[in-house]
Image: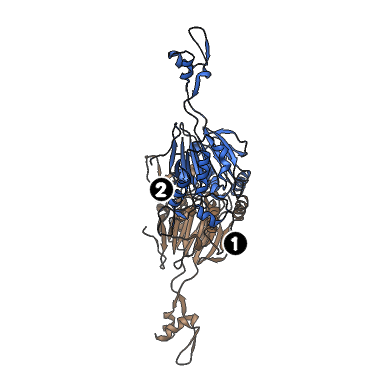
Chain colours: A brown, B blue
Amino acid sequence: MNLTFLGTSSGAPTRQRNVSALAIQPEQGRDWVLVDCGEATQHQLLRTGLSPLKLRAILITHVHGDHCYGLPGLLASCQLNGRTEPLTLVGPQAVWAYLQAVIKHTEMRIEYPLEFVAVTASLQMSRGGFHVRAAPLSHRVECWGYRLEEAHVPVKLDTARLQSEGIPPSPLYGELLKKEQVQLAGGRVLNSRDYRVPAYPARAVVVGGDNDRPELLAGLCRGANALVHEATYTEAVLQKVGPEPQHSSALKVAEFAREAGVPALILTHFSPRYRKASRKPSDLSIEDVRREAAAGYAGQLYLAEDLETYTISREGRVDLRAP
Amino acid sequence: MNLTFLGTSSGAPTRQRNVSALAIQPEQGRDWVLVDCGEATQHQLLRTGLSPLKLRAILITHVHGDHCYGLPGLLASCQLNGRTEPLTLVGPQAVWAYLQAVIKHTEMRIEYPLEFVAVTASLQMSRGGFHVRAAPLSHRVECWGYRLEEAHVPVKLDTARLQSEGIPPSPLYGELLKKEQVQLAGGRVLNSRDYRVPAYPARAVVVGGDNDRPELLAGLCRGANALVHEATYTEAVLQKVGPEPQHSSALKVAEFAREAGVPALILTHFSPRYRKASRKPSDLSIEDVRREAAAGYAGQLYLAEDLETYTISREGRVDLRAP
């Protein structure tokens, strides 16, 4: 399972970071799902191996421009490139109103089926290899976090159960993976599904939108392998800016991730004031954000960069894939 | 006077070319004017020395997405970066309706004065060091071409006239450039403005939008140094595609430029099917476009690439600036 960050800046793009977009891909196949679609997301995709024609769903957290101004262009380019397969758009109703207005005013043509699903707390859908759920967050406009859990986990035999029932290894074990029922030599009939278990726990990631109350993601985070959350500011800058923009500090997110027991935390959506390479001693550095988060959280901590891909292994381990 | 191409692809971006946008800058100062604003224009600007805070006007040719989907993001980033100075947007009424809808639906905040001017054939405005005029073109939606002529040409003395009137060179020549009136030793009073002429003819460039009738630009092209026009297809591809998209072939534009006597022609807005480097013999090459145009036009011919800057010298010569 792969997470590819297409944009990691808040508000406006910089030379190093585009605005928000995150591609999530299951282990098998070329299908994928996009969370948020800031301006120039389609441009970033040209620098990856992800095909817009294999995109199955777009989940938008909220209607602010840095999370959705790339939507019209991406959808229009899908049309130009001959897409015919359906695409699902999920998000607040305002996102659909925005998109419909753009389509109308600019005579944009979309002939493939584009389905809109207004996000609610009871959302349950499966697209692109994932089961998707959502939870409302706290921001200046309606905003949501999404949980994507892999839908297709291979099964293996529950050999412990078979042996505890006195059924020793034999060619019959193989039949239990292929047939619905298998009859033992003594006449006993086994229902195969009773002896099948997932080969590994389904992997899940939670992706927050802009949000000043990370604890609202507690439900979605239960059992998840990783949380992706904005850390727009450090605590000191957040105090200076004030609560009005309704963003989180690195510390706040780290403390939530620790309390929720999330094993991996990937921070993103950084204010452009945090520079990668400090030019002057007074420059704020992205390392300030990292230090603050690390002080509050002892799990696997990452600060996302554009075009990085993180993998979640079958064992649930999150790693940055070598470029 | 500089023309910097921020996007040269039609319809959708490619790895090498973004969608339409062209920055035009007078010789003096840092002000500039933008013609069209496809998605990720603000991203391209990050790769140039042009400051969005010095942008004085945006002229939009038509409301199709590849010419205006970068507008909301650019305007929003101006706000985030503290712009307070006014900005003028010129274009078809549909562009304003599109922008107003985006502002409304996405809660976009613009606090600097944003003035909209609906383009008409009688447009006469001065912004960013240019006099701007417009002419209607022929496309699937309302579409316009713009002429930008430099507004501030330094003056020099009309020494030929002075000498023909028997006024020989003297320190008085210098006074004619500073004072309104100058009195000769014999008592005669000269009105200085009668002896001042432009140091060189005002430079002008004409930028067409999408258009299948280049001859509609004949009026604007009179006396212009350069024409920038779409050449979406070669003639052969245009015949195959058919007239419905209402684009021009390289040949059609070249023939118009020859007949109009435009000394320099810069082609842009190429279909992504024309590749810079052919991978297979069947690939169409951008060199096909060049050859077709060169066959019909003997002036200075350029095919624009992204981030190229063309200069127009005081003598009116158009050159590609060394990167």
Residue A143 x/y as whole percent = 56, 54
Residue A286 circle label: 2
Is A294 situated above or below B120?
below
Circle 1 residue: A115
Q: Mark 2 lies on which chain?
A: A
The amino acid type of the residue labelled 1 equals: Glu
Choose between B106 and B65: the one closer to the eye: B65
At numbered mark 2, what does the secondary structure look like: helix, strand or loop? helix
Residue B294 in sight: yes
What quarter of the picture does the C terminus of chain B occupy? Answer: top left
Is B114 situated above or below A148?
above
The amino acid type of the residue labelled 2 equals: Ile
Q: Distance between the residues labelled 1 and 2?
A: 39 Å
Q: Mark 1 lies on which chain?
A: A
Choose between B60 and A133: the one closer to the eye: B60
Residue B301 x/y as whole percent = 45, 43
User: Do residues under tags 1 and 2 come within 8 Å of each other at their CB atoms?
Assistant: no
Residue A30 x/y as whole percent = 46, 65
Mark before the other along the chain sequence, 1 or 2: 1
At numbered mark 1, what does the secondary structure look like: helix, strand or loop? strand
Label 1, residues with CA under 10 Å away: few <14, some 14-19, many ≥20:
few
Residue A13 in sight: no
